[in-house]
Image (spheres, helix red, strand yellow):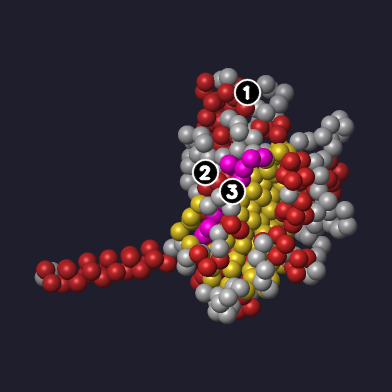
Amino acid sequence: MSLHRAAVLIAACVATCTSAAAQEFQVEDVPAAASVPIAQIKPRTVIFADQRNDKLADSSTGLIPFDDWARSRPVQRRFLSLFPSFVEPTLKQQTKLKLSVYQAEARFRLPKPAAALDLSRYANVAFLEQIDPAVKHRPITASDAVPNKDAGAAHNRPPNRRWCEDANAICVQSRYMFEGKIPAGIQLANKLREESKKPIPDFIEFQSEIMLVAQPHLAELPSLTGLDSTVASGLEQNIFWVNQVIQFGKLLAVLQQHPTEREAAIATVYIVIAVRNDVLNKQKEYSNTPMLRNLVPAQLLMGNSSFNSGDSLSAGLPKYARSRIKAIAEIMERE
């Protein structure tokens, strides 16, 4: 191969790689997504914030007690809880199941009018597979939804309806197998557990409902985003049953017209995960066992363990939220 031809090929490769890298969204951490002026959001940039440094967050976990979150942020509670009237459930023993909340919010600019973007295209399994290929999904019906048929999980069902019965919704059962060192750590923890206790699964399994936000709630979303412009559409995923650790989860994406640019839209995305405190309280049990110190639940959840790895749930909630929102931004940008 001549030196000239080799140089041309190298230059072409560099140009292609540079172009591909330019298409990738960058994630920029900020104290609060809504505090960044819209005009300052750069193209292909996700403005991201979570609550780990919030004044309400527990210093030992980085999570906010659910009651504090619900009381101090009623608008967020209304739109980002599993349903507006959700409260910490009371168990059979008449004890309240205490929860803690991880909340992430992000914002990015899209170079199209909001009306030209159709969020209904994302209410399907294919979209879920795109934003996190490590999670496997299968469709389910209302008869499969655990809170619809299990009295012990009924507190996770809205008071006025059953999950998965809306004709405009799709429901899925999803499974994520833990990656990296976590499965080996779980195997060790199970060996050390009392035989009477159920083994810890090496996977997270959950059920969720995906649908577009309908009126009148759609028109009320600016009270949540803090952006005074027309809401074109909203998409929500409600995780209403999980096999361990998590009580519920929610993803909400809101598309609004850019306030000053006709050919641009602003997307705001929220991710909320409510974690069971009885799981977090296992911190003392694990921290006192040298071989299990890397399995302390709060550290694993917040990405502070040497066992954390990858970009999915094994990475911890902060990295998982960033990865998932970045994937959503890139999919919407390509539409």
Q: Position of residue 132 (x, y in %)?
A: 55, 55
Q: Which mark is residue 315?
A: 2
Q: Secondary structure at mark 1?
A: helix
Is residue 280 at least partly visible in the picture? yes
User: Position of 161 compared to 34: left or right?
Assistant: right
Q: Quadrant of the C terminus?
A: bottom right
The residue lying at 83 percent from left, 51 percent from top is 85
User: Position of 89 compared to 244: left or right?
Assistant: right
Q: For marks 3 and 2, give the CA distance.
A: 16 Å
Q: Secondary structure at mark 2?
A: helix
| Residue 213 lies in the magenta stretch | no
The residue labelled by disc 3 is 50
The residue lying at 61 percent from left, 62 percent from top is 268
Nearer the N terminus, badge 3 or badge 1?
Answer: 3
Mark 3 neighbour density, 10 Å: few (under 14) some (14–19) many (20 or more): many
Residue span colored magenta: 46-56
Q: For marks 3 and 1, give the CA distance.
A: 26 Å
Asked whether 304 or 173 is in front, the reply is 304
Which is more foreground, mark 3 or mark 2? 3
